[in-house]
Amino acid sequence: MEIWINPACSKCRSALSLLDAEGADYTVRRYLEDVPSEDEIRAVLDRLGLEPWDITRTQEAAAKELGLKEWARDETARDRWITALAEHPKLIQRPIITAEDGTALVARTEEAVQEALSRNKS
């Protein structure tokens, strides 16, 4: 199991605390320093079952500068969104946990972290 975090994010810190409390075996990826490639973002999106605009933090300054709210949200624009996430990792919603069963979750709630943990026990 891997968790993509921004250490400055309270939801990331909460998720890490919960994983530690459960004795989970996980790897931390500080995705602002170890930026995921476009292919890694595609793979995580597949695991999440989401589109890139579903995991984009549209209130970030970079999102406003890029005008993301005006971008199309369809298959023709998908690669453009993925490129933006790779070039501006701060736009990626966090934390994201990749589970051992091949799925992933945006773990912003305690329930989502518990769900990720349950997927690792199966």
Image (tube, helix red, strand yellow):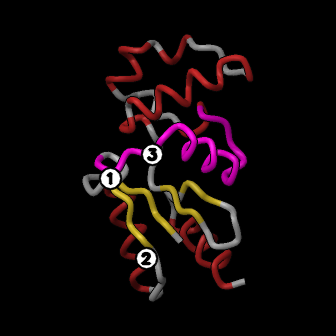
Callout 1–callout 2 Cβ contact below 8 Å: no
Q: Nearer the viewer, residue 77 or 37?
A: 37
Label 2, label 3: how far apart the Cα atoms are:
24 Å
* Disc 3 target residue: 36
Q: Nearer the viewer, mark 2 or mark 3?
A: 3
Q: Nearer the viewer, residue 82 or 57?
A: 82
Q: Amino acid at mark 1?
A: Asn
Q: Give whichever of discs 1 and 2 has the lower sequence position.
A: 1
Specify start and end residues of the magenta stretch as a single range.
33-52
Q: Amino acid at mark 2?
A: Leu
* Residue at 45% across, 34% down: 86
* Disc 1 target residue: 6
Q: Give whichever of discs 3 and 1 has the lower sequence position.
A: 1
* Disc 2 target residue: 18
Q: Percent position (x, y) of residue 82?
A: 55, 31
In the drawing, does residue 58 fall left or right of residue 50? left
In the drawing, does residue 76 fall left or right of residue 38? right
Q: Give whichever of discs 2 and 3 has the lower sequence position.
A: 2
Please state, as top left, top right, bottom left or bottom right, where the C terminus lies in the image: bottom right
Q: Percent position (x, y) of residue 117?
A: 59, 77
Callout 3–callout 1 Cβ contact below 8 Å: no
* Mark 1 residue element: loop
Q: Amino acid at mark 3?
A: Pro
